[in-house]
Amino acid sequence: MRMRMKMLLLLFCCGVVFCDQNHSDPRDQRVFPVISINYDYIQMPFEVSLWILLASLMKLGFHLIPRLSGIVPESCLLIVVGLLVGGLIRVLGEKPPVLDSQLFFLCLLPPIILDAGYFLPIQPFSENAGTILMFAVVGTLWNAFFMGVVLYGVCRLDGGRLASVDLLSCLLFGSIVSAVDPVAVLAVFEEIHINELLHILVFGESLLNDAVTVVLYHLFEEFAHVGEVSAVDVFLGVVCFFVVSLGGIMVGGVYGVLAAFTSRFTSHTRVIEPLFVFLYSYMAYLSAEVFHLSGIMALIACGVVMRPYVEANISHKSYTTIKYFLKMWSSVSETLIFIFLGVSTVAGPHAWNWTFVTITIVLCLLSRVLGVIGLTYIINKYRMVKLSGKDQFIVAYGGLRGAIAFSLAFLLSSDDFAMKDMFLTAIITVIFFTVFVQGMTIRPLVDLLAVKKKKQSKTSINEEIHTQFLELLLTGIEDVCGHYGHHHWRDKLNRFNKRYIKRCLIAGERSQEPQLISFYNKMELEQAMMLLESNSSASLSTASTVPQQRSRRTLNISKEREEEIRKILRANLQKTQQRLRSYSRHTLMPDAEEDDWSETRLRKQRVEMERRMSHFLTVPANRSESPAVRRGRFESDSQVHTVRPSVLVSVPVSLPDDPEEADGSTQSRNGGAQKPDGLQDSRGRKLSVKFALDVEEQKLPRCLSDPGPNNLLEEEELFYQKD
Amino acid sequence: MGASQSGGVHMYQDLADKTGFSIEQIKNLHNRFKYLTQDEDTLRREHLEDINNLALNPIRRQIIEAFFDTRNLGQKEKGCLQEIGFEEFVTVLAFFRPPKPHIAEEEKKNMKKEKLRFLFNMHDTDNDGVITLDEYRRVVEELLSSSETIGAETAKAISDAAMLEVASVTVGQMGPDEFYEGITFEQFMQILKDIEIETKMNVHFWNLDTRTIQCGK
């Protein structure tokens, strides 16, 4: 069935290709044409959509074949598909489209980089920044020059067709091929789940070496054009490198700050918040590209700078939107890139030269290994956590080349570089080699070498407390020693951030929020879901009321459920607004205080809870009331079903002690819903009311029995209407 | 100072063997010690409190106390000293030494245990071997004290939740009449086993040129 669909689609593709020639002219006919074909009108968008559709269907297809996706990384499969499609097009007599460099650099690459930059884990990145920079800058330079020079030597020795390749061309070729490609690295590394350190090392290197590649590329291209090199030019080249990288970062930073500042005022127009994020980032990329600065670094800087402030300002729905759109675009882009690589392979003019190609592949591997070993030797002197041999191997082996190299080579002008076709062929071969051979074998190698995998468990609140405690402790010890180390500067930066920057860029009181509180908030919600999930007739023995220091609980939650819930929640929760005494409702002590709730906090929590509800269909209590399931897709606003809010929410709220606080009205609202004793709290009732009000299709009976502020209902309705 | 040079070198060597620092590092630390104490022989709490940067640290009290805590100094009796010498100073700082690259698994575990023990001692202020709810609460309060908008109830709630979590992780199901006393050291180790203490709780000791650095004093 799947194969049939694919065949149909491919045939359709070809049909599309043929349609090119159909210029129907309706005016020629005598009779009024009821149906006429005007393909030209929609040709361009139609073909684009068709390609994207093809890419997405391929992606779908792969994941339905379970064993295949376990062995072969997706990128390989996509290239193969591209080859097939290209072959098909060629067989049909058409000229297959080549990966247009402008399309690649302006449309396909930015989403991937933005996705990577926006979700870049800052902590490990900044801890290993020195290492990453060393690999990115020095490593790439070494690769480029080593390859260029040795290749030149080989060409000289070989004679024949290769004799005409001069040093500059070789150096240019070396600089194009030596850069580790972020797209390929992402595609492969995401599937093997190695530990964070290695992931960030290779990935960070692939992102940051863009500056070096850009400089070298333009440098050598310019030299080749001009024809001669002087010492001043080389010096200017070095200066250019700094300008390119720092300039790119600055441009990104400026746009990031602008985006953060804009997001401060978007509280009334929530729907277009994601748009600002995307637009500012894209503008940063384009602005950098205008001046030949490093667009990738600009994009990353923009994402990194704006993220903490934007996330504090925007609504939860916008956060979800941003996240999903970025993932979607980057996924589609990646798929398209690999497919086009395959197609371009079939299409492009090829000039195969055994010597050149094999030497290139060998040199790539060799220079990478030597570079990594040499650099690690130097770096390990300055690192606290040394890189072991296994780590070095993975870093070296993970240096995959990809589409950026191809596009850069494609951009070369044929007059300056007579051997352009040979270069292209060689680059494509290298890409195929790294993606196929290295990509496929890296997973079994990781298992074989028992490289540490990504830590699966999520942090508990204890770990969070102690991590923060440790951070402060280390800062203190550094101060005692008089040592201005990593912690000291980070502490200073945080303080500066808190006092000045957050005031400007974050709206309202959120600027005062300490991290521990937001973490705790997340945990609260997690607990909520945990208790909900565990058929919360679960034994919740109440605390003793008398001694304040004792608390006893038994929580009967299965560990896997807990993990599931935590995973999803942790991955998606956003910081919520803090209020001074909001926590008293969660206190386990009998003297819990009444609290006044802020509306936004309620709304946020409610929104988050709703999102989570989709994963946790079940209402723990009475199934006879047929709880409806709310779909998780936030887009499907019209299909929102309801779910039992009150049980959900009331549970976490009051782990508590007073059974007599059980609210009669909520009981009535839930009909026969069973609620554990002592789990009602006046505040719990309030929160559940918000849920009930929020629901569009009131499938639950008697949901509105509770009075509550009505403006929440309006706001929510308004939101949904705008969608 | 010249006469005691040779004696000083011996002392350095002994300390280096005991704590694992290199001679160079011990020398630097000694310079720092002399700077902090203004060339006196012993270090007192006031000397540490005078450090400007430390004043901004919310947990400075506990950090300072840790230096004078006899448990960290390997002494048998529990209590606090009023002043410490250079040897004790270095002993405490040795807890933050990074692990050597090729050490055995056993040694790594020992190191981890020692560091966790240090942390535990910092929390367990009354020396009873258990971190009670009150003590934990104080810890959380101090962590949050840097933010002015937080009150005591917040800290209470957070520490309650944290204790709850420790209880559920380590003890599991408890009967309806049991009370949870507090966190013992074994439980402490258990809940923090996922944080790689031996790699995180380290301070670089290699560029401690204290005379030339502008120390806040």
Image (cartoon, rainbow, N blue to C red):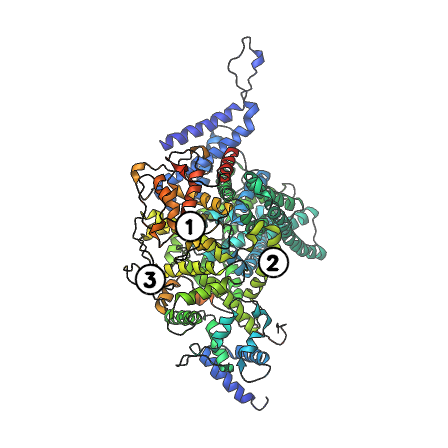
Which amino acid, by three-letter code, is at mark 1?
A: Leu
Residue B161 position in % (x across, y down)? 40, 58
* Depth check, front residue: B112 or A556: A556
State the mark number for residue B170. Answer: 3
Q: Are marks 2 and 3 on the same chain?
A: no
Q: Earlier in the sequence, mark 2 or mark 1?
A: 2
Q: Is residue A215 left or right of residue B187?
A: right
- Give the image location of residue A233, x and y in percent: 70, 54
Q: Is residue A438 visible?
A: no
Residue denoted by label 2? A499
Badge 1 and badge 3 both on one subunit = no
Residue A492 as seen in the image, left or right of residue A461: right
Dot 1: what SS? helix
Cα distance in 3D space between marks 2 and 1: 29 Å
Report, in whole angstroms, how far the alpha carbon at label 2 lies from the one at label 3. 40 Å
Query: SS at mark 2?
Result: helix
Image quadrant assignment for residue B213: bottom right
- From the image, tell me which residue sits under label 1: A525
The quarter of the picture where residue A287 lies is: top right
Can residue A625 be seen here? The reply is yes
Separation (CA) of disc 1 from disc 3:
22 Å
Residue most toward the bottom? B3
* Contact check, label 2 and label 3, Cβ < 8 Å: no
Q: Residue furthest top?
A: A30
Nearest the viewer among A116 and A172 is A116
Task: Tell me the amino acid under the disc marked 3.
Answer: Thr
Amino acid carrying mark 2 in the image: Arg
Mark 3 surroundings: few (<14), some (14-19) or many (≥20) residues within 10 A: some
Q: Residue at x 57, y 40 (%)?
A: A268
Q: Is B153 located above or below residue A351 in the figure?
A: below
